[in-house]
Image: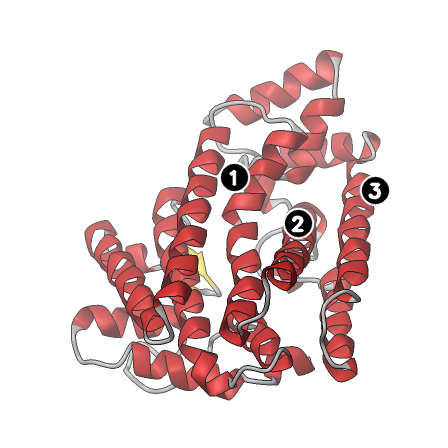
Amino acid sequence: MRLLERHRSLIVEGLRDALAGETSLRRILRVHVGIEDEQGQPVDRLGKLLRPALVLFVADELGADPKRSSHAAVGLELIHNFSLIHDDIQDRDRTRRGRPTVWVRHGVPEAINAGDLMHAIAVSTALKHSPDAAGLLLQATDTMIEGQSLDLDFERRPVDIDEYLTMIDRKTGALLRCAFELGGLCAGVEADVREKLRRLGHEIGRAFQIHDDLLGIWGDGDVVGKPQGSDIRRRKKSFPVAVGFERADGADRERLERTYAGSDDVGDDVVDWVVDLLGRLGVRDEGERRVRGHLDAARAGLQEIPFSDEGRAQMNELIEYLARREK
């Protein structure tokens, strides 16, 4: 995809510079991010690099020098990776991108240290651009951590759709909004343009996470990279489950509450029942409707931002990808 490849080499170079050093913790971080393998050899297992790509895309389109803006973009990507290290500990996830997570390979105490160091490097990297960039990054980090705390709280009780949306606007949406606004900050745009950029990030963030939650239940396990229905096995209170709690009644509601309040392993029969219930309640259709609505709002908002025709085409291409992605 053109937008994601536009400044990829600049982002990779910045990550290598930021994480350089021969301490054991820095080696752990390079493996976690995906720029080095376990034997210390350079690799590219970085994934899409969506957030820093958005920073540099927006900055470039609105008149900033991408190389000068790269410190802000790399800082954001490091904050994202810091959050993944700590999330994996809290969620007890043993693999990420097909590899053992940091806490599995090195233990929880060292994983906490690695995440803390990643956070410090992220802020110091953003400061190389400007104090304002670092401040914006810290505000987004604050919001993201509040969202993670809400997500953990949801494990103990049923949730409704409004609560779920509040959580994803923080946990997922904060860094995506920050990506757009950081790009605007790098370009020195006026406050009204930054607000339009924030709104674009908000709509894309909601669409991204709701679609991701649909994949967590109905996605092809071989494509998504985790077994079909894995979010149900983990009792994750994702968008489909929040809708299910609002729409189910009677015996279905009682069984759904028991399923998500339990601690025993969730068997195939229970997974099949939950998937069938969500289907009967029209949950998948509701999710797809909401994704389309947020992406339509993103397309409309895109027209109000002074991107070039080529830039607008590239952003529309990304929006189309988010609407149909399978992983």
Mark 2 touching mark 1, by CB under 8 A? no
Q: Is residue 221 left or right of residue 174?
A: right
Q: CA distance from mark 2 to mark 1?
A: 22 Å
Residue 76 picture quarter: bottom left
Residue tagged 1: 234
Circle 1 — which element? Answer: loop
Residue tagged 2: 206
Q: Is residue 194 left or right of residue 88?
A: right
- Could you say where residue 108 lies in the image, as x and y percent from the top left? 24, 50
Q: Amino acid at mark 3?
A: Asp
Q: CA distance from mark 3 to mark 1?
A: 23 Å
Q: CA distance from mark 2 to mark 3?
A: 16 Å
- Name the residue located 26 percent from the left edge and 81 percent from the top edge: 20
Circle 3 — which element? Answer: helix
In the image, which is nearer the foreground, mark 2 or mark 3? 2
Residue tagged 3: 285
Q: Residue furthest front?
A: 190
Mark 3 touching mark 1, by CB under 8 A? no
Give the position of the C terminus as an image quadrant: bottom right
